[in-house]
Image (tube, coloured by chain):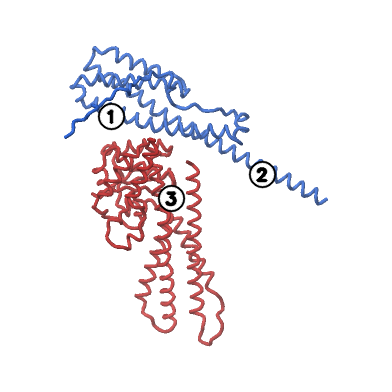
Amino acid sequence: MSTAVLLITVVITAGLLTVLAGVLAFNGLIRKRNRTDEAWSQIDVQLKRRHDLIPNLVQTVKGYAAHERGTFEAVTAARAAAMHTGTDPGAVAAAEDRVQRSLASLFAVAENYPALRAQDGFLALQEQLATTEDKLEYARRYYNASVRDFNTAIQSFPGTVLAAPMGMHRYVYFEVDTDDRAVPTVDFTTPTRPAHPTTA
Amino acid sequence: MYEQITRNKRRTIAYIAVFLVLWLGAGAAVGALATVLTAPTADGSPPDGSDVPAGLLIAALLAVAGVLFTVMSGSRLVLAVAGARPADRRQQPQLYDLVEALALGDGIPTPAIYIVADPSPNAFATGMSPARAAITVTTGLLAMMDREELEGVLAHEISHIRNYDTRLLLVLSTLIGLAGLLAGLLWRSAIFTRPRGRANVRIVLLVVAAGALLSVIGLILGPLIRLALSRRRESLADASAVQLSRNPAGLIRALRKLQANETPLARTNHLTAAMCIDDPLHHHPGAMHRLFDTHPPIADRIATLERMTQGLTV
C-alpha cells in the first residue's frame, strides 16, 4: 500500500516537474523569437529611412551633375529593387548591399563637384545617410545576436522537442552571402612601403 | 550575455536582503536599548514589555519607504543632485545619434539624454530599468572627446543600463543614503536636546546609540558593500562596451584623456560617484577617498582593454 502511494507520488511529482520545465522552455522560446522579430523591425525602420533619403539625395546631386545619368539610374534602380525584396533577411541584405554600393559610387561622383560638396543640403543628406548606416550596423549586430540565440535554443534540448510542433524554424542572419559579392583580390606579395627606409 | 543580466538582478535582491538584515538589526538593537534604558521604573518593578518589535517595525517601515521612493523617483533625484538638464536634439545631434545607435545594438529603448554644464569630463547612467533609464554627460566630455571616443564612453554607459547596474547602484545608494541621513538627523537632535532629569538623559543616550548604529551602516558598511560591487561593475561595463561597439581603441583613448584630466567635477557626492565613468572623487585629495574608491584605477582598465584588443586581433 505504502509503496503504491510512494510510486504515485513520485510519478505525479515527475509529471509536474516535466510540465513545469516544458512551460519554462516554451516561454523562453517565445521570448527569444519575439526579441528576434523586434530586432528585425528595428532594421526595417533604418532601411525605410535610407530609402526615404535617397530620392532627395539623387535630386540634389542631379542639380549639379545632370549628365551622370548612369549613376543616378543605378541608385534609383537599386532602391526600387530593395523596396520590393520581401522579408527574407538574406535577400534583403543582398539588395541593400547593392543600394549601399550604388550610393558609394554616387558619393564618389559627388567628389568631383566642389560646389555640390559645399552645399548645405547635400552635406545634411550625407550626414543623415551616414548616421542611418551607423544605426543599421548596430541594429544588424543585435538582430544577428538574437538570431544566434534563438537558433541555438531551438537546436538544443529541450527547445528541439518543442520547436517543430510550435512551427518554429531557424531564422536567417542579416548578412550578405559572401558568394554574392565580388571580392576584390588584394595582392600582399609586393611590399607597399619601400623595403629600405632611409636611415637618418 | 543574458545570464550576466539575470545574475545582476539576483544580486540586486541579495544585496537588498543583506542590507535589510543589517537595517532591521539596527532597529532591533535600538529597541532593545530602549527597553533596557527605560526599564528601571521608579519603584524598580520589571519592565512591562520589550521595545524590540517597535524598533523592528520602524526600521522596516523606513526601509520599505526608502525602496519605494527609489523605485518611484530615485533617478530623478540623482539627476537633480548632479544638476542635469535634458539635452537638446538640435544642439547635440551627434550625441543623440550615437546613443540611439548604441541602444539599437543592445536592443534596449533609447534612454533619455541629459547634460551637466561642467568643464570636467565625465558621464553616468541611471534608472531602475532600461525602459526608464537616462544617460548624462558633462559639457566637458563633449568638448574633449571625438566621435569614436564619445562612442566608447556612451557604450560603457549603455552597458551599465543593459546590465542593470544602474538599478543595483540606485537602490543601494538610496538605502545607504537613507541611513546616513537618519544618522545625521539623530546626531543633531542629540546635540540640541538639553537633558532635563534622568528620563531625558536616557532618551539622549538612546538617540546617540541609534545615531552611532546608523552611522556605521550609512558611512562604513553600506559604502563597503557598494564598493566591492561597483569596481567589478566598472570592469564588466568596459568589457560589454567593447563587445557592443567592437572598437576598444575609442574607449582606450577616452580613458587616457580622462586619466590626464585634472579638473574635478563641481557637483558630486557619493550618491553619483559610483555611477560615473571616471571616479569624480578620485581627483579630490585625501586618503579617505582613496580607501573608498568606487572604480579600479584607470591604468588597470586601459591595460585590460589593451589585452582585449590583442585578443581580438590575434
Q: Disc 2 designates what residue?
A: A17
- Indicate which disc, 1 or 2, sits on the residue closer to the N terminus: 2
User: Outermost residue, left direction?
Assistant: A200
Image quarter hosting the C terminus of chain B: top left
Q: Position of residue B271 (x, y in %)?
A: 36, 56
Q: Residue at x 35, y 39 (%)?
A: B248
In whole angstroms, how far apart are the C-alphas of marks 2 and 3? 33 Å
Which hue belongs to chain A? Answer: blue
B103 relative position to A3: left or right: left
In whole angstroms, how far apart are the C-alphas of marks 1 and 3? 35 Å
Nearest to the eye among marks 2 and 3: give it.
Answer: 2
Q: Disc 1 designates what residue?
A: A127
User: Counting other residues with Cα less than 10 Å from the Cα at mark 1, is it few (<14), some (14-19), or many (20 or more)?
Assistant: few
Type of amino acid under label 3: Arg
Seen in the picture, residue A127 relative to B155 is either above or below; the reply is above
User: Outermost residue, right direction?
Assistant: A1
Nearest to the observer: residue A169 or residue B53: A169
Q: Disc 3 designates what residue?
A: B167
Residue B145 quadrant: top left
